[in-house]
Structures are given as structure tokens and as C-alpha cells.
Amino acid sequence: MKLIWQLLRQHVSVLQLAGFLVTNLVGVAIVLTAVQLYRDVTPALQVPDSFLDNDFIILTKEVEGAGIGKTSFTQAELAELAEQPFTEVHADRSASQLSESL
């Protein structure tokens, strides 16, 4: 070990040693930050989404032309959907109550 220190003292300046120390500290800080971010984000990404479970299906109607005219489901379409075997409860919701203009 003593020979290694003698060799280092001859070929490495104090400024180079200080530079190595600073770059190693920056590298360790980057690695620790990445590990911390991974540990913080992983639980949020693994939690199942409570809103869009397998219990819900969102249906939309294709808009033809420029969307002028009636773009919501008709009562006959809603009744047909309610009769489907996979439908337990359906809710008629509209996307917006705002007026539209071109």
C-alpha cells in the first residue's frame, strides 16, 4: 500500500485528486437521486386505476361531418344498449352543456 501512495504522489497532482473527488461525489449524488426517484414513482405506477376498472365501459358515438346536428345517443340506441347481457346499469351522460359554434 505504501508503494501505491508513493506512485500516486509522483504522478497525480493535488488538483487532479480534488477533481476526482468532486466528480465521484457528483456521480454518487446522481445515482442516489435516480434510486430515490425510482422508489418514489414505482408505487404510484403499480397501483391499479380505481376509475377505469374492468367494471366500466365508456361508449362514444362517431361524429359524422362537422358535428353539426345531433351527436348524442338516441333513445332507441340507449334501449338497445340496456338490453345487452353485459349491461347491468347504464348512465346517460353528455360530454358538455356548452353551445358549439363554427
Image: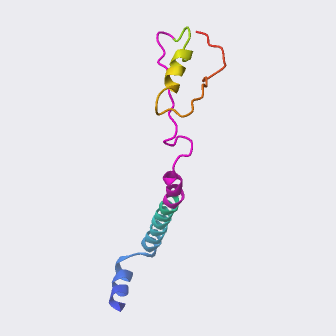
Q: Nearer the viewer, residue 77 or 28?
A: 77
Count of numbered tags: 0
Q: Is residue 95 magenta-colored?
A: no
Q: Nearer the viewer, residue 64 or 12?
A: 64
Q: Quadrant of residue 27?
A: bottom left
Q: Is residue 39 magenta-colored?
A: yes
Is residue 74 at least partly visible in the picture?
no
Q: Quadrant of residue 19?
A: bottom left
Q: Nearer the viewer, residue 76 or 69?
A: 76
At 65% from the left and 14% from the top, the residue drawn is 99
Residue span colored magenta: 38-66
Q: Is residue 75 above or below residue 47?
A: above
Q: Position of residue 39 (x, y in %)?
A: 51, 61
Considering the image in quadrants, where does the N terminus appear? bottom left
Is residue 15 at least partly visible in the picture?
yes
At 47% from the left and 18% from the top, the residue drawn is 62
